[in-house]
Structures are given as C-alpha cells and as structure tokens.
Image (tube, helix red, strand yellow):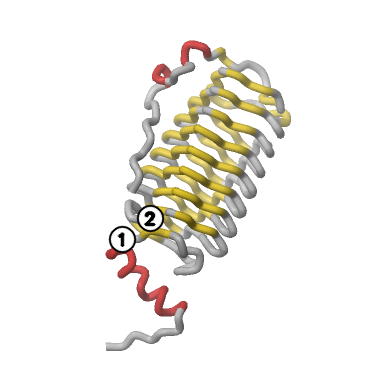
Amino acid sequence: MPSVPPVPDQLADLPYAHLLTPHTGPLRGDRYDTVHFEGAQEVVSAGGASFLECAFTGTELQGARLRQARFNEVWVQGSRWIAVDCVESEWQDAALVSTVLAGLTAYGSAVRRVTFRQCKLEAVNLRGAALRDVVFEDCLLRDVDFGDARLTEVSFPGSTLEEVRLAGAALKQVDLRGARSLGLPDGPNGLRGAILGSTQLFELAPQFAQALGITVKD
C-alpha cells in the first residue's frame, strides 16, 4: 500500500499560511488566491469559482452551489459541507481533514492528489468522476457512489466502507487492503483492478459465489 502523503494538521503549518487574508462578504464565483475562509459562509452563487492556496477552517456550507469550481492546493479542516453542489468540479493537491461531507454531489468531477483524513462522507455522489492518487485515511464512507467512475491509485487505509457502490467503475491499482471493513452492495461488480487482502477475499466469497451462480454446500 502506498505511503500516505504528509498533510498539515494546523493552519500555521501550511506553506502559504503567512500569505492568507480573511474572507469577508458572500462567496461568489470569483477567483480566490491565498484566502482564509472561516465559519459559516453566505453563498450567492459560486459556480465556476477558483480557489488557489486557500484554507477553509470550521466552514459551514449548506446547499451551496460550487458547480465547476476549481480547488487547487486547498486545505479544508473541521468543516461541514451539507448538500453542496460540486458537480464537475476539479480538486488537485488538496487535503480535507476532520471534515463532514453529507449529501454532496460531485459527479463528473476530477480529483487528483487529494487526501481525506478522518473525514465522514455520507450520501456522496461521485458517479463518473476521475480519481487519481487519492487517499481516504481513517475515514467513514457511507452510501458513497463511485458508479462508472475511474479510480487510479486510490487507497483506503484505516477506513470503513458502508454501502459503497462500484458498479461500472474502472479500477487500476485501487488498494483496499487497509480498509477496516468493506460494505460493497454491488459485490464483485466493479472490483476488477482492486487489490484485496486474503481475509477480505474470504469475507467477500459468498458474494463472488452468488455472482458466478455457484452454490456452496458442506
């Protein structure tokens, strides 16, 4: 399993921390460079917004529209993003720490070199998304849909997967060995290209047998 990339634990640890300026006013579809967002955010319409070297700490976003937004070298910590529209957004060289993403819609998005650490993802739609070099470390993924997505070099060390769907997904070097549990309602459908441990394979054996039409009797 590939090593987990270093992720800053504190705002002050960010290489651009000394450049950050506090954000004021509503969040719009503008370009934000080295801006610090903190607390509840009023969103007018932030579709197509661009965030470069920005930090989000304790942010509360409810029903925000961030469709086709770009997040480059951003750090999100201790935040709650509920029912946020991130359809066709782009994430690169980003980190999300101790953050809740619930009811988030991000189908068709591009996620590259991103780390999720101690996050909770619930009812998240990533259908048709492209994920490359992504790490879910010590996360809870519940009702997350990767259907028809492309996952390349994605790992889940210490994470719990519940009702995670992979039907139609294209996997390449997706390492599931470090996951604490695998709740995959689609069974083997979509697992081609995944790396499993022997214990995990044994646990999934009934689903494999059912998919192949095999009856096992002692």
Q: Which residue is mark 2?
A: 176
In which quadrant is the C terminus drawn?
Answer: bottom left
Kind of residue sitting beneath label 2: Leu
Q: Please give the name of the residue rendered at 70% of the width and 24% of the height, measured from the top-left corner.
A: 30
The numbered dot on residue 5 is none
Q: How many residues crowd around disc 2 within 10 Å: few (fewer than 14), some, or many (20 or more)?
A: many
Q: Which residue is mark 1?
A: 197
Looking at the image, residue 191 lies above or below residue 176 = below
Kind of residue sitting beneath label 1: Gly
Circles 2 and 1 in contact, beta carbons < 8 Å: yes
3 or 30: nearer the viewer: 3
Q: Is label 2 in a helix, a strand or a loop?
A: loop
Q: Is label 1 in a helix, a strand or a loop?
A: loop
**Rendered location of residue 44, percent (x, y):** 72, 28
155 or 187: nearer the viewer: 155
Q: Is residue 216 visible?
A: yes
Looking at the image, residue 77 lies above or below residue 197 = above
Total marks placed: 2
Quarter-of-image position of residue 109: top right
Q: Please give the name of the residue rendered at 44% of the width and 18% of the height, measured from the top-left corner.
A: 15
Looking at the image, residue 175 lies above or below residue 34 = below
Quarter-of-image position of residue 210: bottom left
